[in-house]
Image (cartoon, helix red, strand yellow):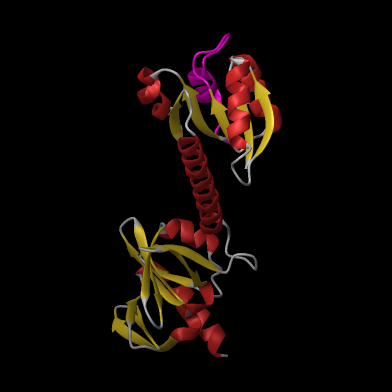
Amino acid sequence: MRLLLVDDEPAALERLAALLGQVPDVEIVGAARNGREAAEAAEALRPDLVLLDIQMPERSGLAVAAALPPENRPEIVFVTAFELYAADAFEVEAADYLLKPVRFDRLRQAIERARRRRAMRAAAARIEQAQDAPVQEDMDGFWVQVRAGYVRVPLSQIDWIEAAKDYVLLHTATRSHIHRATMTALERKLNPAELMRVHRSAFVRPARVRQVLRLGKGLISLVLEDGVEVAVGPSYVNAVTDRLAIRQE
């Protein structure tokens, strides 16, 4: 983990550096002695974590933290002699708040907390990117949140999808998964050759359709391999029958 140290007292910087020498997997990439230097160093060095004093010349540590851009934002651990800024520190999403003189056990705890937060943010970003990416050769499924974390649901295993307010249900042969998405967003992503939209509230895999039922007045429904019946919306009937006829030729 790459660290930037910021304090206007040279003795405080030396003490932090000495303590950090006992923490595994950390690297001090720079040091700054006032708010302006801190902002410049954070931009230039792109550290993973900034150990940041609060009361400093030119710009306070709180102001530095508040001005950091959200992209590639480092974790922040404030190191200060004053308790009264703790609430303000967490308003700028600090990972921890250490009081001087810094104890080694609290410093190590703060670094591990920052490390975990950074890892969780990276994992969340990867999942969000996977969910938002078009369904192409490099994105063939969905990350679905479950109690223990996330599971991958391959696109090839999904028989049909139905809307459930702000969520959708991804139905496979063995179980159903709830996933936060809209039907409109899915229609932009999904390949209609794999999952075609048959209703405002449903997509169906054509290869899983075993029967088409005529309901009268030009309406139809689709019976899937597992017996599930999915209604076809009136405005989708022609496209669905054309698609199935092409598949059956």
- Measured from the top left, where is residue 41 in percent x and y? 67, 25
- Residue drawn at (57%, 64%) of the image: 135
Q: Can residue 180 be seen in this view?
A: yes
- Measured from the top left, where is residue 209 in percent x and y? 43, 85
Q: Give whichever of 163, 45 is nearer the camera.
A: 45
For this view, does 25 lie left or right of residue 95?
right
- The magenta stretch spans which residues? 53-73
For this view, does 181 lie left or right of residue 154?
left
Is residue 23 placed above or below 31 in the rendered structure?
Answer: below
Is residue 32 placed above or below 194 in the rendered structure?
Answer: above
The residue most toward the left is: 216
- Residue drawn at (35%, 70%) of the image: 233
Res 3 quadrant in image: top right
Main structural element of the magenta stretch: helix, strand or loop? loop
> Is 239 inside the magenta-drawn segment?
no
- Residue drawn at (52%, 40%) of the image: 111
